């Protein structure tokens, strides 16, 4: 069996919605939702929060401790290095893959994480991703990358590719063994991440209606199909392009 480590990147320095990962959502911090999803997936041998050395992120480290997970700290803007530091801190020589999760995606579905982890093992892939261009809402994305591939990326990735960790892999498919997992209920038109106040308003409405059932993406899709006015709350919010870093 492959040993998988979930690494959740989290910081408080967001320019559009500062301290968003610490924001309350349904009675617990947004980061706590992501940690819970990783644990509930059943495929992650350990969950690690990767935050920055910025003193403002002491609050993230404190919350990670309260949640009972290890916290590793690294550069603010070089997220790839932050992941490499985290991987080494958890004895990466014993780990096969890293499940990359972002702390501003509180509605991550444990079953999707599990599918990605199992596909990583069955296909011995370098990189597994949800098929986000066609079926997956921004905010439900899951990636699994081998530790070996992360190390290969270090001398290759520059600029925005260091901020986005795996974007170099996606841009060079001929150099890596890549597999993708589409969702049975396409939802790419939805936005379920947390970047701006409108996103927070939508997430609050979803969790107020579904409670813990919001961790199953199919329930969220069904709700927003039944109440399309909710999806319009943040439909105007643009997705930050990779080139922006």
Image (spheres, rainbow, N blue to C red):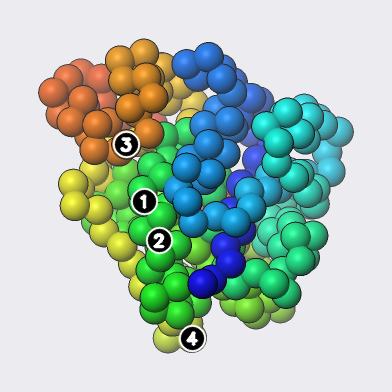
- Across and down, in percent, residue 216 comes to 32, 36
Q: Is residue 83 above or below residue 188?
A: below
Question: Residue 198, labelled with which disc?
Answer: none
Report the disc number at residue 175: 4
Give how far apart the Cα atoms at labels 4 and 3 are: 34 Å
What is the crowding at mark 1: few (fewer than 14 residues within 10 Å), some, or many (at least 20)? many
What residue sits 76% from the left and 34% below the top? Answer: 65
Report the residue marked by disc 2. 116
Q: Is residue 188 left or right of residue 196?
A: left
> Can you tell which of label 2 and label 4 is closer to the viewer?
2
Disc 2 vs disc 1: Cβ atoms closer than 8 Å?
yes
Q: Is residue 10 above or below residue 115?
A: above
The residue nearer to you, when weighing 120 against 160, is 120
Which mark identifies residue 112? 1
- Spatial distance from mark 2 to mark 4, Cα to Cα? 20 Å
Q: Judge by depth and name the residue closer to the eye, 219 or 158.
A: 219
Identity of the residue drawn at 64% across and 25% down: 22
| Secondary structure of the residue carrying numbered label 1 | helix
In the rendered image, is residue 235 in sight? Answer: yes
Give left or right: position of 133 versus 222: right
Q: First in sequence: mark 3 or mark 1?
A: 1
Quadrant of residue 3 within the rendered picture: bottom right
Q: Secondary structure at mark 3?
A: loop
Residue shown at the point (36%, 48%) measured from the top left? 111
| Cβ–Cβ under 8 Å for marks 2 and 4 | no
């Amino acid at each position: 069996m492959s040993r998988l480590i979930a690494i959740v990147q989290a910081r408080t320095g967001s320019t559009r919605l500062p301290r968003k990962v610490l924001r309350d959502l349904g009675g617990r911090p947004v980061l706590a939702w992501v940690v819970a999803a990783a644990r509930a997936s059943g495929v992650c041998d350990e969950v690690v929060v990767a935050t920055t050395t910025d003193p403002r992120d002491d609050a993230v480290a404190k919350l990670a401790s309260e949640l009972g997970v290890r916290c590793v700290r690294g550069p603010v803007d070089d997220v790839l290095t932050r992941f490499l530091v985290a991987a080494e801190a958890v004895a990466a020589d014993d780990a096969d893959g890293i499940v990359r999760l972002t702390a501003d995606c509180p509605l991550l579905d444990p079953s999707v994480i599990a599918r990605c982890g199992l596909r990583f093992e069955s296909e011995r892939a370098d990189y597994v991703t949800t098929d986000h261009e066609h079926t997956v809402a921004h905010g439900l994305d899951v990636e699994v990358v081998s530790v070996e591939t992360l190390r290969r990326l270090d001398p290759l990735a520059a600029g925005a590719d260091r901020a986005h960790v795996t974007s170099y892999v996606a841009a060079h498919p001929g150099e890596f063994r890549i597999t993708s997992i589409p969702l049975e209920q396409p939802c790419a038109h939805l936005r379920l991440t947390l970047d701006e106040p409108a996103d927070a308003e939508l997430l609050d409405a979803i969790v107020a209606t579904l409670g813990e059932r919001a961790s199953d993406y199919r329930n969220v899709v069904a709700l927003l199909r039944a109440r399309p006015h909710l999806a319009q709350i943040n439909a105007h919010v643009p997705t930050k392009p990779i080139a922006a870093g």
